Image (tube, rainbow, N blue to C red):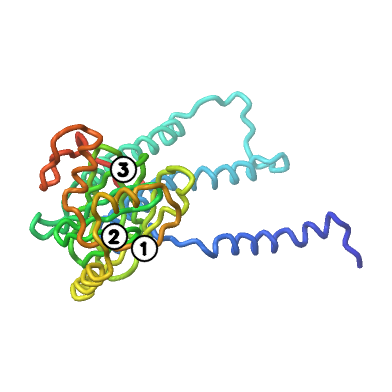
Amino acid sequence: MSLRPGRLKTAFSAPFLALTTALLLGGCKLTLLDPKGPVGAGEKDLILISTGLMLLVVIPVIVLTLVFAWWFRASNTRATYRPKWAHSGRIEAVVWGVPLVIILILGTLAWTSTHRLDPYRPLAPADQTMVIEVVALDWKWLFLYPEAHIATVNEVAFPVGRAVEFRVTSDAVMNSFFIPGLGGQIYAMAGMQTKLHLLASEAGTFEGMSANYSGAGFSGMKFKAHALSQPEFAAWVARVRAAGRPLDGAAYAALAKPSSNNPVAYYAPADPALFDGLIEKYLGAPPASKSGKGHDMMHHGPGESGK
């Protein structure tokens, strides 16, 4: 028996489509749905609850569309034909009432979760929070540790279970600082300081990235975030101090030049006034205080949570 081209195409289209889909999705990681911190967990719950509430409308509509098409087919003599039917109060109540209730629930959920997941909201008292300063450059990330007087490029580390306050700015175009495995993202803008509070509840290495297109080298603007035990973190700091070179004005000027796919680099000691100086450069104002409040971006209400 021979297959005509049309039949051959039909016979192979379904398996081919299934195989292609499996190959395309094989490299996908559901990082946002497998968070390793309280912020990411809260955002995951928000995504799942919101999706479930919306499916309460979507699924019945799809099912009823198929049911109506089948029931009111021309060959079904049991279906009542009503050419002059125009209105049903019960149908109107369902069509408008159910979406209205869902919108009210989603609005309440969005309001409460937006405040609860506000990136400016501390996760621990100030004396228990580690401060890491972040500078977006073309096309790399610079991390400054004001307490340890070290700096790194495209690598950041912090202890497991300890809250971290990322103070973020840019010495280039606008970027977006994002660690999907821990949740939340915040924009990095020249002359402004934004904040993102995160905490890793498990040890591991997380992918970091820019979530905002910033030019030709954007695709390589990635970094590793290491959540380490306290002894491991202390060893990492010692390794950075031993391997690094001073981050002074000349070293920073060379680093700030546009470059793509930068390898990890260590600097020690790092100028503790560098971060505030970068903001001052664009504002023409006195340096920010080390409390981190001097040049905060104006923050009227909730900031940006996970996007």
Which residue in the protein does label 2 denote?
Answer: 152
Mark 1, residue position: 264
The kind of secondary structure element at disc 2 is strand
Is 271 located above or below residue 264 in the figure?
above
Of the numbered discs 1 and 2, the one sitting upstream in the chain is 2
**N-term mark: 2 or 3:** 2
* Residue 171: assigned label: 3
The residue lying at 25 percent from left, 35 percent from top is 282
Q: Which residue type carries mark 2?
A: Thr
Residue 26, quarter of picture: bottom right
**Counting other residues with Cα less than 10 Å from the Cα at mark 1, is it few (<14), some (14-19), or many (20 or more)?**
some
Q: Position of residue 33 (x, y in %)?
A: 38, 59
Q: Position of residue 151 (x, y in %)?
A: 25, 59
All told, the count of numbered labels is 3
Of all residues shown, which one is farthest toward the right? 1
Instruction: Measuring from the top left, give residue 83's x and y in whole percent.
Output: 63, 26
